[in-house]
């Protein structure tokens, strides 16, 4: 297991390498957005499946979200973040650089994890996915992940604090004031089905 500190993690991220780190739900593999192809290769993930843009603070996403959805986004973000909610939202034209798929929406999340937020405050938002080979059950600790993804550096210190082991809830914006549940997860949101 190759455990690295924050300083080295930031250097590796800027050079295009992904990093595995703990979140509040499941451990994540993340990279700077322009290097997102590496996550698909490592995970053996279908390139049609989008990645999630993880941030450290709500304001990091204000210019990314399309203005038509911004008020609804800000409401949900202020109510449920940091925490186990991924919000799929239309994004502004200038933010297409963050897309890892061909549509014009993006999943956004701010985890309730000191490790993740500290890293992302320094690196800027990271495109992420769960730290596992696609289709396999995600591991919840660094040792198991290092056996499945031995060539990816792990952010220390380890052992990590315990995560929930349950994926985030995913909701998608439909139109003003209307949301649709895509995946039930850790958090329950009243009135969204």
Image (tube, rainbow, N blue to C red):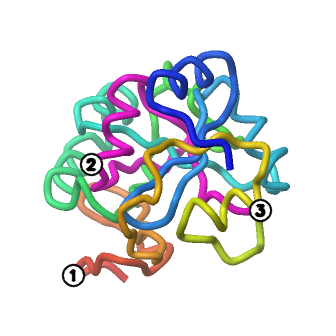
Where residue 90 sits, quadrant-wise, is: top left
Within 10 Å of disc 1 (Cα), the crowding (few <14, some 14-19, many 20+) is: few
Give the number of the disc on residue 59.
none
Mark 1 → mark 2, Cα distance in angstroms: 16 Å
- Residue at label 3? 148
Where residue 4 sits, quadrant-wise, is: top right
Confirm whether the magenta stretch covers residue 33. Answer: no
Vertical comparison of 8 with 177: above or below: above
Within 10 Å of disc 2 (Cα), the crowding (few <14, some 14-19, many 20+) is: many
Q: Earlier in the sequence, mark 3 or mark 2?
A: 2
Position of the C terminus, as image quadrant, is bottom left
Give the number of the disc on residue 190.
1
Mark 3 → mark 2, Cα distance in angstroms: 35 Å
- Residue at label 2? 73
Number of residue marks: 3
Give the residue displayed 34% in from the left and 67% down from the top: 179
Vertical comparison of 14 with 89: above or below: above
Along the line of sight, the residue nearer the viewer: 32 or 108? 32
Q: Earlier in the sequence, mark 1 or mark 3?
A: 3
**Kind of element beneath mark 1:** loop
Vertical comparison of 102 with 46: above or below: above
**In contact (CB < 8 Å): disc 1 and disc 3:** no
Within 10 Å of disc 3 (Cα), the crowding (few <14, some 14-19, many 20+) is: some
**Kind of element beneath mark 2:** helix
Residue numbers of the magenta segment:
104-133
Could you tell whether 110 is left or right of 91 in the image? left
Mark 1 → mark 3, Cα distance in angstroms: 37 Å
Percent x, y of residue 165: 47, 76
Vertical comparison of 55 with 150: above or below: above
Along the line of sight, the residue nearer the viewer: 113 or 54? 113
Give the residue displayed 60% in from the left and 39% down from the top: 19
Percent x, y of residue 47: 80, 49
């Amino acid at each position: 297991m190759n455990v690295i500190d924050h300083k080295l993690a930031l250097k590796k991220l800027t050079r295009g390498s992904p990093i595995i780190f703990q979140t509040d739900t499941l451990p994540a593999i993340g990279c700077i957005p322009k290097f997102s192809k590496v996550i698909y290769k490592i995970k053996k993930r279908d390139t049609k499946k989008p990645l999630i843009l993880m941030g450290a603070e709500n304001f990091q996403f204000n210019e990314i979200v399309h203005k038509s959805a911004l008020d609804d986004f800000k409401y949900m973000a202020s109510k449920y973040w940091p925490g186990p909610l991924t919000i799929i939202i239309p994004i502004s034209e200038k933010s297409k650089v963050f897309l890892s798929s061909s549509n014009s929406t993006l999943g956004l999340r701010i985890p309730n994890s000191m490790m993740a937020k500290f890293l992302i405050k320094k690196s800027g938002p990271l495109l992420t996915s769960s730290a596992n080979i696609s289709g396999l059950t995600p591991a919840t600790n660094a040792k198991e992940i290092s056996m499945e993804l031995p060539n990816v550096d792990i952010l220390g210190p380890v052992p990590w604090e315990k995560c929930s082991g349950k994926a985030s809830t995913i909701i998608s914006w439909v139109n003003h004031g209307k949301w649709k549940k895509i995946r039930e997860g850790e958090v329950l949101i009243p009135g969204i089905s």
